[in-house]
């Protein structure tokens, strides 16, 4: 129902927009972290870690970090030590191409790879509190550090694939990501401000979800909004898009756990 | 036991007003039924009690209108070194407790 309404609103916005040619070709303004578009109250809530609900998941991740898992009976901490030191800056470099498997992995993928190969444990399900917690806990160690993903070499084809998806019109509303999040970033869509699509605060605590969610869950919501076929969480298309978003966001600070509407 | 966070200053002077903040992970299912909607029965935290050195200093009755993962903040006057113990109880009688020690030298 909600998605249908959003779709209608986007449709209406598009109808107005089409009558003013050339707007879509506006030069993209410099990117802004989505926090800038939050109300004063939500900004304060995100900054105050005693009140930031995302910290409940960060705490869960911290506990899981120290817990022995799987057949190997090893905890993350047994190899990686204190996350505060070993994981600092890691989230800022992801998604990244894994050298051994030559696959593009985001933080969630990397955690699950470590679980299945090193801990010999079951992979955690996308959107499970465990995976959200571990991802948030690791990304939290990079809070404030600038996004700095590798885009050359083996990563380049993935960046290109992500860029292609970003610029490709899709769904019944025939909209590309760039048409809203580049050309219209900072403008209003109903009561909300359209973000620059940087995704630097994920996993985020989103009020609409009344809980924590991954970037891929957000991308699915966006695709539902334009009435496109949604990919699964962790799909190669989303991974490539995630890398492209991170390459656009280079230099912006990691904000995990961020608060979003 | 659900994940919970309490933030209390580590130390305070006698007579000082201290702020205490707490979060708990809970879906706060309202149980409200919309026409045609398939809803779960109500499951909210209905009561929060807080004791300081054994004496109750704060109590709240929560209502279905309160959002998931409820946040509470209040102030109290530091008197002696003691534990500040939070107890949340929900509709399924699940009880979560968490504590922090406030040192008053």
Image (cartoon, rainbow, N blue to C red):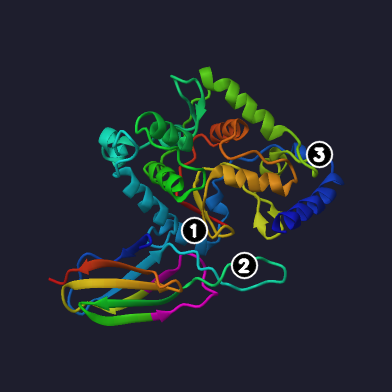
Host chain of mark 1: A
State the residue position of label 2: B39
Q: Residue at x 34, y 38 (%)?
A: A70
Q: Please state the extent of the stretch shown in magenta in the rendering.
A: B60-73
Relative image position of residue A170 (x, y in whole percent): 75, 38
Q: Which residue is mark 3?
A: A22
Residue A243 left/right relative to A122 = right
Instruction: Find the distance from the CA under tag 3 to the CA under tag 2.
Output: 47 Å
Residue A196 appears anywhere in the view: no
Residue depicted at x 84% and y 49%:
A15
**Residue lying furthest left:** B105
Label 3 Cα crowd, 10 Å radius (few <14 / some 14-19 / many 20+) = few
Secondary structure at numbered mark 1: helix
Tell us which disc is closer to us: 1 or 2. Answer: 2
Identify the mark nearer the N-term, 1 or 3.
Answer: 3
Q: A168 or B40, which lies in front?
A: B40
**Spatial CA span between label 1 and label 3:** 34 Å
Q: Name the secondary structure under disc 2.
A: loop
Find residue A114 and report its horizontal and vertical position in percent.
39, 32
Q: Is residue B72 magenta?
A: yes
Q: Where is mark 1, residue-wise? A: A43
């Amino acid at each position: 129902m909600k998605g249908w309404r959003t779709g209608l609103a986007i449709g209406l916005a598009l109808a107005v927009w089409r009558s003013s040619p050339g707007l879509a070709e506006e030069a993209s303004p410099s990117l802004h972290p989505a926090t800038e578009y939050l109300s004063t109250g939500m900004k304060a809530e995100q900054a105050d870690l005693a009140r930031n609900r995302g910290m409940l998941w960060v705490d869960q991740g911290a506990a899981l970090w120290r817990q022995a898992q799987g057949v190997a009976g090893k905890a993350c901490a047994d190899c990686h030590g204190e996350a505060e030191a070993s994981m600092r800056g890691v989230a800022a470099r992801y998604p990244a191409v894994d050298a051994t498997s030559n696959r593009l992995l985001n933080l969630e993928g990397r955690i699950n790879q470590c679980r299945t190969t090193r801990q010999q444990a079951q992979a955690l399900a996308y959107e499970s509190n465990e995976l959200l917690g571990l991802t948030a806990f690791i990304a939290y160690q990079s809070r404030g550090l600038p996004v700095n993903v590798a885009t050359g070499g083996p990563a380049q084809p993935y960046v290109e694939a992500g860029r292609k998806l970003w610029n490709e019109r899709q769904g019944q509303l025939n909209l590309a990501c760039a048409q809203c999040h580049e050309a219209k970033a900072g403008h209003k869509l109903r009561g909300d401000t359209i973000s620059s699509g940087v995704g630097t605060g994920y996993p985020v605590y989103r009020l609409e979800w009344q809980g924590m969610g991954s970037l891929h869950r957000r991308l699915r919501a966006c695709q539902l909004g334009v009435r496109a076929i949604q990919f699964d969480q962790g799909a190669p298309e989303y991974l490539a898009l995630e890398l492209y978003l991170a390459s656009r966001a280079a230099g912006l600070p990691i904000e995990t756990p961020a608060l979003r509407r | 036991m659900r994940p919970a966070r309490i933030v209390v200053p580590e130390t305070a002077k006698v007579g000082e007003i201290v702020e205490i903040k707490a979060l708990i992970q809970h879906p706060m299912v309202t149980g409200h039924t919309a026409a045609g909607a398939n809803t779960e029965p109500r499951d909210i935290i209905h009561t929060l009690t807080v004791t300081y050195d054994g004496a109750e200093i704060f109590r709240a009755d929560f209502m279905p209108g309160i959002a998931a993962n409820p946040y509470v903040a209040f102030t109290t006057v530091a008197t002696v070194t003691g534990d500040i113990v939070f107890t949340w109880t929900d509709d399924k009688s699940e009880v979560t407790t968490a504590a922090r020690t406030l040192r008053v030298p």
